[in-house]
Amino acid sequence: MTQQTVADVMTPAPTTVDSTETIQEAARLMAQEDVGVLVVRSGPTATGVVTDRDLVVRGLGAGLGADATVGQVASEQVATVGITDPVETAVEVMRAAAVRRAPVLDGNVLVGIVSIGDLAIERDPTSALADISRAEPNR
């Protein structure tokens, strides 16, 4: 049996945003794409991530207006994994950085994103987290 890699569990082509975009535009993009995280990019590589929580807590909650930039609220210390890394490496990297999602790189090029939900579905498909991660949004 071959070892499972990050490529086997990641979500390909994650939604990205430039750090100069406004947090209002980032929120609009999240709503349009039905995602809770955007990978902040500079050219073809990931420079950070921004979550819906970042937009609210670090942005609006901190008194910044809707015209504040993504760069002002994004997490700049981004934990990344390689596309050919074993799944176990992704688990270790995410645990060590205490993050729920990690951009996936092929060299320096962003190719995907992996979440703790993706890992739960693959590693422990009967867990509560895997069940929640597989469920369709309740709107």
Image (tube, grey):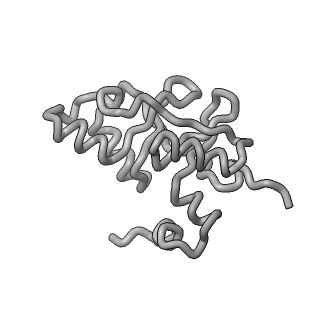
Query: Which residue is depicted at the point 41% across and 56% down?
Result: 34
Between 105 and 93, the one nearer to me in the picture: 93
Between 3 and 48, the one nearer to me in the picture: 3
Give the x, y percent position of residue 93.
57, 41
Q: Residue furthest right?
A: 1
Number of marks drawn: 0
Give the x, y percent position of residue 8.
70, 54
Query: Which residue is depicted at the point 57% across and 28% down?
Result: 45
Q: Left or right: 89 with respect to 59? A: right
Q: Image quadrant for the N terminus?
A: bottom right
Image position of 99 with respect to 136: above or below: above
Q: Left or right: 31 with respect to 2? A: left
Query: Which residue is depicted at the point 64% across and 30% down?
Result: 109
Give the x, y percent position of residue 92.
59, 45
Q: Left or right: 107 with respect to 93? A: right
Q: Left or right: 61 with respect to 91? A: left
Give the x, y percent position of residue 60.
18, 39
Query: Which residue is depicted at the point 17% across and 32% down?
Result: 64
Image position of 67 with respect to 114: above or below: above
Between 129 and 137, the one nearer to me in the picture: 129
Q: Residue furthest left?
A: 63
Q: Image quadrant for the C terminus?
A: bottom left
